[in-house]
Amino acid sequence: MSVAPDDIEAAKASVAIEDYYHEGRLFPPSETFKAQAILTDRSLYEAAASDWEGFWAEQAEQLDWFERWRSVCDWDQPFAKWFVGGKLNVSYNCLDRHVLAGNGGRVAYYWEGEPGDRRVITYSELLDEVEHFASALRSLGVSKGDRVAIYLPMIPEIVVSMLACARIGAPHSVVFGGFSPDALRDRINDAAAKVLVTSDGGWRRGAATPLFENAASILAETPSIEHVVVVRRTGEDVSGLMRAGRDHFWHDLVAGANPHCPPEPMDAEDLLYLLYTSGTTAKPKGIMHTTGGYLTQVAFSHRYVFDLRPESDVFWCAADCGWVTGHSYIVYGPLANGCTGVMYEGTPDFPAKDRWWEIVERYRVTTLYTAPTAIRTFIKWGTEYPAAHDLTSLRLLGSVGEPINPEAWVWYWENIGGGRCPVVDTWWQTETGAILIAPLPGVTTLKPGSATFPLPGIEAEVVDDAGRQVERGGGYLTLTRPWPAMLRGIYGDLERYRETYWTRFPGRYFAGDGAKVDDDGYLWFVGRVDDVMNISGHRISTTEVESALVDHPSVAESAVVGAKDETTGQGIVAFVTLKAGIKASAEHARELRDHVARRIGPIARPKALIFTEELPKTRSGKIMRRLLRDVAEGRDLGDTTTLADAGVVEEIRRRAQTSPTED
Ligand code: PRX
């Protein structure tokens, strides 16, 4: 990853921030929790430390393999292969083996649609649907290795599609339903997907979002797509947009499909899926995840971080399958472990602000996994919403996606967990595939705001600018050994993989995160140190938003920064210079925000947009983002001597103070 000196300065400043509030209390596992926990001692840490490969082999043995591997890990830095020579099938592990073991009647998902419609889906039923759809995909000419794009809302068919792909060895590429048609087109084209699975729409706050219509608007520009499958969800009439021979309704296809579709034996290193994520450039990266190591580690981490009891737990990961959290902890980890999950289509405030708590109460949810941004929103809404429901079924809470501030942690612990449920803060990334740094709830004493320690089998170190380990204090998080679910590369660009993650600190994987080690050796994450923003736990690159802005005919130049936001962690602030003769106005600012939302998706809409005559640049012409971040966050600007024209800053600051912010 190329980190400019400007960013390193900013990182150092942010890591050194002492106003990062340390809640002094310690939360050791309670006796009540320990009495029922699956692990209460350090045996897993010890096993991994004494025989690292043996430890991971033991985790892999929890899965069913058609053929055993020859070696556990081949490491040719930065390229890893895990369970080399082993053969298995992910959908077989997630479905067939539970049914064969007599657990077919267990609920796989309690699904709750936004309008209040519900489905209870058992493992046998899910297997049946997956076999039908896998056969349907085969009948459309999809074979092992072909990529399938999935653009669906949170309905059961998204899980069915993913598993059907896994069953026949066709890597899937799920594109979040909130992404724009342009974003969908770019992802389809990068992967050269053969089939697209989408729906007439999805529900969001009572309105139907037009997914097929979005897709239809770009299908002329996706030459690799041979077929489109359309799920009926909202009942919108899309038949006028459908093209005969290319587009098919899901229900028509599965009605005539062969109910039996044997799982394809896959090599442990065969591609399971691609998932696009934002990096420091405008072009999203297709992160590659493979079969054996990925499934081993998501199942392992799901079991131990969430202290899983598959026969009695009801696990709700309240993410969307469009993100890695959904892939690993709604679909693959929970299903590999044969547990019961909850899936919800809509937002937390529809039809009312207690929707989540109503769901927890209805399904007797035992484990809730969500993001700090959701927790901070609930704090804002007030305790009356959770207090109106019986949440006593909960026994464990999780957090993911961004640093959780200690106040939010404690609020979650008290008001949702009733003071009984450990809160596990889990650090990981799209690239890591699975949780790497988190407590083990029956073992670790928790500190609110800290993700605590690397899991057994994971080796991480915080280093300084020169790549020397920092025993105590701030620096950059790096991983010093491969791990089974690690990305295998960036689709179509292996060199970019090496360059992005392995060159900043030779011999180490650099995650892009600043972290701090406290006096007890606990890890505290303090945010990204590169040009990646974290908005409500979603990664968005500053460059991606900038290129969307300059793509508007009125924009000459733009610079985008992530500024602290109380609810969403960071908010997008855009500084824009217009072309000569174009007038800045509030309406024009709105138009530009909308333009970004159309180009990328509503999550990328800037919260504030500030017009400026010029952007602050160094004498060598580099935009000084650090300074813009300071302006956006209202900080004292300090030394501006490297600026080409210091007057520019004063002007920007004045304008920033008077520009409206969108809620
Ligand atoms: O900056 C870190 C932050 O989210 C980034 C990864 O984003 P993404 O690939 O979209 O995956 C999000 C869900 C796994 C990381 O580089 N992040 C994730 N979890 C945490 C976190 N920051 C602090 N604490 C966490 N628990």
Image (tube, rainbow, N blue to C red):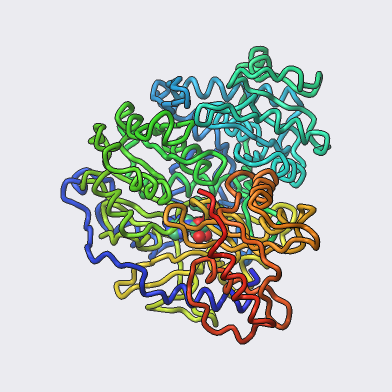
Please report the residue visible at 54 percent of the width from the left and 80 percent of the height from the top.
465
Residue 140 point in image, percent of width and height: 75, 24
Q: Quadrant of residue 495?
A: bottom right
Q: Is residue 597 left or right of residue 241?
A: left
Q: Quadrant of residue 202?
A: top right
Residue extending furthest toward the bottom: 641
Q: Is residue 287 visible?
A: no
Residue 639 point in image, percent of width and height: 55, 84
Q: Is residue 425 left or right of residue 168?
A: left
Please report the residue visible at 42 percent of the width from the left and 62 percent of the height from the top.
51
Q: Quadrant of residue 253?
A: top right
Q: Is residue 614 visible?
A: yes
Q: Looking at the picture, does residue 114 appear above or below residue 23?
A: above
Q: Looking at the picture, does residue 646 appear above or below residue 127?
A: below
Residue 111 point in image, percent of width and height: 45, 26
Residue 505 point in image, percent of width and height: 58, 75
**Which quadrant of the figure contains the N terminus?**
bottom right
Q: Is residue 465 left or right of residue 38?
A: right
Please report the residue visible at 27 percent of the width from the left and 64 percent of the height from the top.
23
- Residues 148 and 62: in front is 148
- Residues 260 and 50: in front is 260
